[in-house]
Amino acid sequence: MKQTRRSLLQRVAAMAIGWTLANRPILAAQTIAKETPPDILVNNPSMVEADGRLRLDFGPEGVVLDGGLQPSMLCSASGALIVQAQLPEKSPPGGRMHYPFLLATVISRDGGRTWTRTPDNVLNLEGGITQLRDGTILALDTYVTPGAKEDEGSGQLYTSQDDWRAVQGPQDALFTLPGIDFYASSDDGGRPHNAERLHRRILELPNGDLLTTLYGTMKGDRTPSTYKATMMKSRVMLLRSKDRGRNWNLISTIAVNPSVGTEGFDEPVIARISRGVREGRLICFMRTGRQLHEAVSDDGGASWSAAHARVFAGLDTDRTELWVDMFRNVRGRTGRFLNEDNLDELKGSVVDPDLIEMRSGLLAAAFGIRVPQQLCWPHYQHPWNGNYVAFSHDQGATWSNVVRMTSGVPTTHYMAIEETPVNGELFVTYDIGFWGRPKRYICGRTVKVGMKAGAGGLRTGS
């Protein structure tokens, strides 16, 4: 039946009232924070979608790193939690290409109750950190810069044999990347960016080979992003190492499509299914500047399904009718009002997904939703605006449990998740605050994930 604009607005108003009631404690804390930011903003997780099979118990929220934004993390086999984030201070000038803000790394060896800052180094853990089966911790700096020859890249590898108490490196890492173009794009601030970016996870395969993901540009990738003409839309690629990270070879392009999103494909994360009929399947989640996209491979990464949008719990970033009335009197960065005539700035976006297979076989994904896509910082009040964790019982086919960790609060929407040595226990990190805000910090808390009595086990069939 045809829906009139009046009936649509009535439905939206009713939904907004429901959101306000459901999130009253969270929105009340957010309102206080807008006027006089407290030292600690209490966040109350709430279920967005649930199938009745999982029981989630949330530990207390604590500060991991004061001043930090956008965490990367590893939980070692001993339970050591290694978290890195950016600080407000600028990085020292000179040297190899590095992030413009200073990076700090902290470690907890008591389950997140206390944290110790490690000596500063230039390693940017956004490139990935993992612990191999023999106990070695291996990390890659995120930047791959032009190598000595065409189609070669230069990276940096760090290792630790004692649970990150002592770190060796950097050691040179060589990347063989036929067709790569290091010089096609600026970064999202318009600065020169003669590099490709490693991102998120390093997987150790049963035979000892390593896989990781890279995003950037190949020769011919010349489609500008929608909000920065000098930044080209990127693609996501899969790399393999047969010698514990010293040499990497391009295996395949996971996704490329210049018509997708505002940024193409970037900020990827991969996970590998270890059991069931989908054993060996690789799943890759990717940012696009709009909806999160997903591709899978069942042949070790040689080929990939066409990337498609993955929308969790109906949280569709194109559903502008659900928030247009909240923002229609707000001007965007272009000076235009955020309304039905300015959907490019009004739409939301999903950023920086994380993804792991837990030891039970359950998949856990973390992601942030921005509403609207860039005006979400001065205007962060919409309840969708926040950080999320989702769970899949069926190896990624469906995601029937989704929890909102923060709602309507200032955040950059970046997260990191790890399973601790306690079976079914996640440690989840996210930030409160953003650039230029006087109070900002990384939060962390445990989430214990259990099956409710009578709910049955995980589905591992097709």
Image (spheres, rainbow, N blue to C red):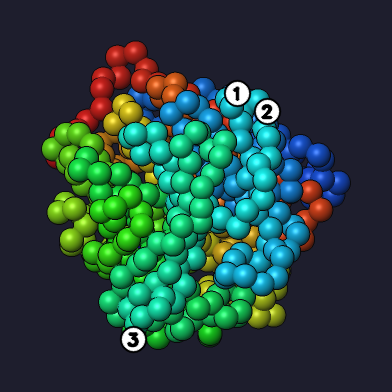
- Residue at image point 36% right, 57% down: 246
Q: Nearer the viewer, mark 1 or mark 3?
A: 1
Rate crowding at label 2 as few (under 14), some (14 to 19) or many (20 or more) other CA atoms within 10 Å. Answer: few
Tell me the quadrant of the picture where the N terminus can be found. Answer: bottom left
Q: Is 455 in front, or is 101?
A: 101
**Residue 205 in which image quadrant:** top left
Tag 3: amino acid: Gly
Identify the residue under disc 3.
Answer: 220
Q: CA distance from mark 1 to mark 3?
A: 50 Å
Q: Earlier in the sequence, mark 3 or mark 2?
A: 2
Residue 430 vertical placement versus 80 (above, below)? below
Q: Secondary structure at mark 1?
A: loop
Instruction: Using the rendered image of the protein, determine whether residue 378 is visible from the camera's viewpoint.
Output: no
Would residue 260 appear left or right of 231 to someone viewing this image? left
Q: CA distance from mark 3 to mark 2?
A: 49 Å
Residue 242 vertical placement versus 403 (above, below)? below
Tell me the quadrant of the picture where the C terminus can be found. Answer: top left
Rate crowding at label 1 as few (under 14), some (14 to 19) or many (20 or more) other CA atoms within 10 Å. Answer: few
Rate crowding at label 3 as few (under 14), some (14 to 19) or many (20 or more) other CA atoms within 10 Å. Answer: few
Instruction: Using the rendered image of the protein, determine whether residue 98 is visible from the camera's viewpoint.
Output: yes
- Residue at image point 76% right, 37% down: 40
Identify the residue under disc 1.
Answer: 110
Q: Are marks 1 and 3 in contact (CB under 8 Å)?
A: no
Would residue 304 appear left or right of 99 to someone viewing this image? left
Q: Are marks 1 and 2 in contact (CB under 8 Å)?
A: yes
Q: Is 188 in front, or is 210?
A: 210
Q: Nearer the viewer, mark 3 or mark 2?
A: 2
Q: Which mark is residue 114?
A: 2
The x and y percentages for residue 55 are 43, 22
